[in-house]
Image: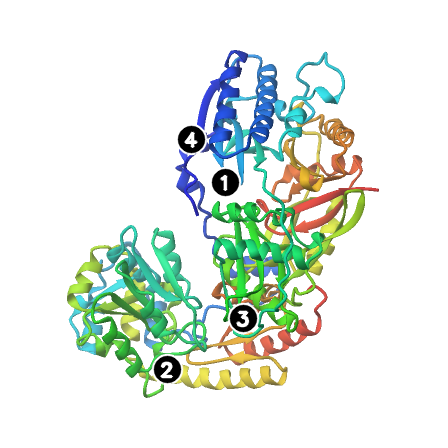
Amino acid sequence: MFDVPLNKLVPEYIKKFEAYIPSRPDPELMRLYKVDHLWRLNNNENPLGPPGGSAQIIEQFPPKRASIYPSGDSWYLRVKLAERFDIDPDQIVFGNGANEAIAFVIKAFCQEGDNIITADKTFAVYEWVAEFSGFEARLVPLKNFGFDDEAMLARIDERTKVLFVCNPNNPTGTYWDEARLRRFLDRIAGRQIVVVDEAYCEFVEAPDYPDAMKLLKEYPNLVTFRTFSKMYGLAGLRIGYLAGSRDVVDVIRRTCIVYSVNGLAQEAALAAIGDDDHVTRTRRHVDAEKAYLLEQLASLGIETHAGEGCYVMVRLPVSDTLVYRQLMARGVMIRTMTGFRFPNWIRVSIGVHEAMEDFIHGLGEVLSDREAAL
Amino acid sequence: MQDRKTDIILSVGTDMKFLPLVLAFTESSSRIFGLEDRDALKLTLASEEMFAYLCGMTGEVRPVTLTMENGFYYALLRFAFDNIDFDPRAFNLTANVSPDEEGFGEMGLLIASRSVDRMSIFHDPLKGTGIDLVKEKTYPEVEPWKSEEAPDREDLSYGPPEVEDLKMFVRSIAGRYDPFVYPQDLRYPGKVVDMVASGEYGVLTATDRKGRIAGGMTWRSTGASTIECYGPYVFVDEGRQDVGEGLVSALISAVARSEAVCLMNRYPTAELPPGYFEKLGTIDFVLKGERRPWDFLFRELKEDPGCRVYAHAGMEEFLKARYRRHFLAREIVPVKYEGERQNPHSVFGARFQHSQDLVVLSPLWDGADAKENLAKHIEVLRAEGIANILFRIDLGHGWHARLYPVIEANGFVPSIVIPYQGKADWLFFTLRD
């Protein structure tokens, strides 16, 4: 057998990278943590699953169709969404989850020396994609758990290309109302691209919450992200999209990977569009379980923070990564928040009631057994 | 961070006719990178010993690449071979230049190690095989300082300090804290400035509205997966715990999205807030003849995915107890030697840290002579007067775990498990008293 001279074959800049290792599949985690069940309260998935129409499509998907290439640019989806939002189908680009759309935008507008601006404590992928691509990510501290518009504006310079606003913010659930978003866009005055990530928009019922789709006609530098992973329960199929003005999207399309969205995902998403009953049922479930969760956590004397969205932040008196392991050993998987720059906080997704009960019970036990913690 | 792409490289063969070139290379490049005469000469002496040793060991001429790296506060001289070009046995600390010579004093690697601050032997698919010699610059020692007016503890802002504030921070640590709660590096303000410039050290301070430093923390990477932090150091009189917690929280936030998986705290202070770290255990260390407990404090920065570790039966119970205590999900795979063919010769790596009177041994190659080879290493290190000898294995390598009887027979006992330091967890052994 040959020794491969990796020290010569691998470029220096690759030697410096560490591979991102995603978490293991549930059955592997259950085996390692020696549990017979696992409540997934870590990824803000919809506990009710996909809408009925989507579920039917998935159940009846003919295996033979798996051998046929899908529409390379999600044609029928774009047509249907364009009709719903009263925009042109060419104003929409689909991706293999909204994460891919983030990469499309950064790739389309940034070159060496450019920067993007976002918050320090928000969805990490804006920052990661920028940094891994060699661009500076300017991080603006949250103010009262929310994006700080003035501070973001103050960080703009001539090399700023894109500003990312997560609305409502994951993980804090805060949002900019329409007046504030408009003021921000007016101040930018089209000089940079403004991305408003609305991954959780369907969970928000507040009347002053803005709909970025409706603002596209007024602000040609505005791009919005949406996903079928959260409200529409299609996270496993990986499908999301962005929308913007025709000119801006034409540029973004140049960086897109075509055929990256599979056929089943496209059909299931098509069936989900317009299922308002599913949205209503999910909202009622989230409202009820969030109220239960907050009440129970309050009775344990634990600090929480909850805004919009299907998740709650919980502040712990011990390390979040330790509590993760302790809860995993009880069959409950939550999201640690050290990676969100909220050390010793966890984010708990709203799940089915039994999962919420198990979480509360498990957390109570964990906090009364703190031998491992310093 | 300054550009480090100023490495100076020399490729020669292991032939003594190249020795003058090697010496000129080391001395000149050491001076270019800022070592003073005395330090440059020490590194040159080490390079002479090393090169002569390698020429003696290799028999036929082999290509060797010398790289001088500018670490800002140090110069690093690397002797590297392609794995396929070199017999690894030569990298045993105990390998003699000539079998005729007597005593440990003539061992080439040992001689080289005496002239430098740090020496490590490596074998890695990406880096190849070789030896790193590190000589640090000489800096003036800190003048401890304590402000008469205490800073405010309210409305603190956290961030990296400017150069002069950084030096003031270092002086304030010396002015307020016992030397045992901060690393030796912090005794030299200029060195810390250079370490920060090199990107090796991180520092953040908390400043009040008047710009006065209320406290700070420092950290450094100790590998791809681990960051080691020190402190928190707090300079306010009241509300010290609150400032400490603010600093720890700010530090964790600063490194949370790095590639590191673990955060260790080697020098905790009384202001370290409860609830942020887990205690993995304690090792007794001997420094300047005095025995001191060294707590291993740790927290994970990422969610633990669990992993597979290899364990010999002799250490399985120890591992199970540690993993149970810390809720670490590990699949333990039993291993043992079952008569299979072995290479005749083993190789152990040695990492010298002279400032801590410490050597960490680790297995590089398995071999039938491992027990005797390890015994010889311990003998050599004891003769050298090293007070603290640790042995470290990576539980992600089955053959490391299989060495347990060899390690145990040489007087080592399992002491600390540190998650995700290598391919899997590292297990440290200490010598029985």
Secondary structure, mark 4, is helix
Residue type at mark 3: give it.
Answer: Ile
The CA distance from mark 3 to mark 4 is: 43 Å
Q: Name the quadrant containing residue A5.
A: top left
Residue A189, image quadrant: bottom left
Q: Which mark is residue B72?
A: 1
Q: Earlier in the sequence, mark 3 or mark 4?
A: 4
Q: Nearer the viewer, residue B36 or B394?
A: B36
According to the picture, the residue beneath numbered tag 3 turns out to be: A346
Per the model, the C-alpha gap separating discs 3 and 2 is: 22 Å
| Front residue of B150 and B27 | B150
- Which chain is disc 2 placed on? A
- Where is residue A87 drawn, in percent x and y? 17, 74
Q: CA distance from mark 4 to mark 2?
A: 54 Å
Q: What SS does tag 3 mark? A: strand
Frontmost residue, A191 versus A198: A191
Amino acid type, residue under disc 1 in the picture: Phe
Q: For mark 4, what is the residue?
A: A8
- Look at the picture and state if A158 lies above or below B360: below
Q: Residue at x 51, y 63 (%)?
A: B253
- Residue assigned mark 2: A204
Q: CA distance from mark 1 to mark 2?
A: 53 Å
What amino acid is labelled 4 in the image?
Lys
Q: Chain of mark 1?
A: B
Q: Secondary structure at mark 1?
A: loop
Q: Where is residue A132? Give x, y as percent.
A: 38, 52
Q: In the image, is B327 to the left or to the right of B58?
A: right
